[in-house]
Amino acid sequence: MAGHQKEKAIADEVHQNQILRELYLKELRTQKLHTQYHVNPLRKVHTIARKPMSWHDNLEEPADARFLNLIHHAAQGPRRKYPEAQTESQEIGWDSEPLVNPQRDDRRLNHFRVYKDITLYKAKMWSLGEDGHHK
């Protein structure tokens, strides 16, 4: 019986060595050496505001003319960028100048709201809550 336990102890050492060897080989297979790092595009980045009184954040840098032209071009409206509409949505309001010059004193086209004594009286009564007002 003593010999049987000794063989089992030896077998345990062999099995233990085999398990450690398999673990070591598995780690070598799954490990990857990373030499290039980048920001994860799926994770939100929280920007931190600069310190207003720090001298190194407020250094004057030379203006890049090409970059400024690119930013100013991007900030322009589509009518200044392109000679004609680029999408169907732009076609709706592309020509926004009125076809007829609006004349404010022409009574045929302009029907302004005119208040006389009776209309002022009735508007005041409605604002105070007179019954019979159609809402």
Image (spheres, rainbow, N blue to C red):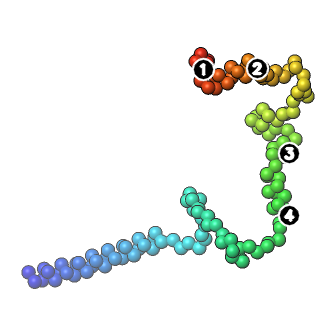
Q: Quadrant of the C terminus?
A: top right
Q: Kindly state the secondary structure of the residue where label 1 is placed.
A: loop
Q: Amino acid at mark 1?
A: Glu
Which label's residue is closer to the chain start, 3 or 1? 3
Above or below, 100 against 81 in this view is above
Residue 99 seen in the current view: no
Which label's residue is closer to the chain start, 4 or 1? 4
Answer whether labels 2 and 1 touch (C-beta < 8 Å): no
Residue with the mark numbered 1: 130
User: Looking at the rendered structure, which numbered label has been put on residue 112?
Assistant: none
Answer whether labels 2 and 4 touch (C-beta < 8 Å): no
Residue with the mark numbered 4: 65
Which of the two residues, 17 or 110, is positioned nearer the viewer here? 110
User: Looking at the rendered structure, which numbered label has been put on residue 80?
Assistant: 3
Which label's residue is closer to the chain start, 3 or 4? 4
Above or below, 85 against 7 in this view is above
Which label's residue is closer to the chain start, 2 or 1? 2
C-alpha separation, residue under disc 2 versus residue under disc 4: 64 Å
How many circles with numbers are drawn on the protein?
A: 4
Q: Amino acid at mark 4?
A: Ala
The reply, left or right, for residue 131 in relation to residue 61 is left
Q: Amino acid at mark 2?
A: Asp
